[in-house]
Amino acid sequence: MERKPIAAWPAQQFSANANTHQPSPNPDITPATRAMYANPPREWVHDLLALGQAARQMIASPKWAVQPPFPCVGVALVTLHSMLDPPTFFLFGGSHEAQMQNNLFPLRYVPTQMPAIHLIKTRGSCPSPQTHALLATRDFEILLWGGHTTSTASLNRDNATLLYTLSLKTHAWSRRDVPGVSPAPNLHGLSATSFQTYLYLFAGNNHNTDGSINSDFWRLDLDLNTGFGWEFLPVTSEAEWPLPQFGHSANQH
């Protein structure tokens, strides 16, 4: 398929002086547009997606004869960056035609190879099939919190009081109770990330109750055994605090 550039370069207007061959200014191009053309935007590209052996076996099984894993909505995504391996995207859960899933698919990005998606066969205390879960990574582990376990995204306190951890070395899920106060379990569009020993959650839309949008900031110290629980971080300065929002993203830097 032919790839077309997102933006075309403006046609140059040459002066009548054949000895200089210098382009004359184009009054229709603003300085901002000239700056954009000096650094033209990159093109989006797309490639075919290959399926690994385990993923092909799952799709060929009777369970998935009518219910494929893709396409689906409400999939959780996180990226694992390693010093040795290429970046790996992990996709969890999602729903296809109202059928929720709890499968975990890794997709390793190698520019010189066709993208291939695989299926990790996990064990242990697996999360329930769900959509819109929050994922983060820490020390070759995947952290999972929240998510909607019903198509109506009904209130489910278990999703707020449980934290799931997947070891990428053993492919085993473990579940940990989080006592005390916690973010609302049915928040939508909030972001999650980890830094040092903490898991952070920010903002979100409580669309299943009053529709309010918040700018709350929570953190969970993952290394604590005594006093393990969510900590609400109060606003310290209105001028420096982000506005209430949802549908954003967060990442380590």
Image (spheres, rainbow, N blue to C red):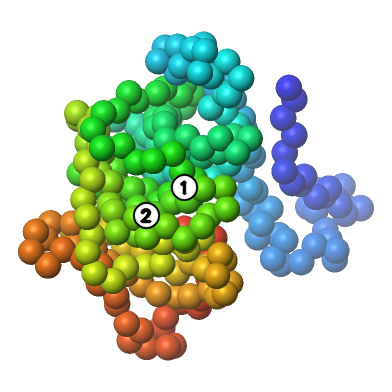
User: What residue is rendered at 41% in x and 22% in y?
Assistant: 118
**Residue type of the residue flagged with mark 1:** Thr
**Secondary structure under the numbered disc 1 in the rendered image:** loop
- Looking at the rendered image, the quarter that the N terminus falls into is top right
Classify 79 as above or below 114: below
**Does label 1 or label 2 sit earlier along the sequence?**
1
Residue ranking furthest to the left:
226
Residue labelled with disc 1: 149
> Where is residue 251 shown, x and y percent of the image?
38, 56
Label 1 vs label 2: CA separation?
Answer: 8 Å
Left or right: 58 as drawn, with respect to 9 = left
> Where is residue 182 shown, x and y percent of the image?
32, 68
User: What residue is rendered at 40% in x and 23% in y?
Assistant: 119
Left or right: 251 as drawn, with respect to 74 = left
Residue 239: tell me if it is visible.
Answer: yes
> Where is residue 200 shown, x and y percent of the image?
31, 63
Front residue (pair 243, 100): 100
User: What residue is rendered at 39% in x and 41% in y?
Assistant: 128
- Asked if marks 1 and 2 touch (Cβ < 8 Å), the reply is yes
Which label was assigned to residue 159?
2
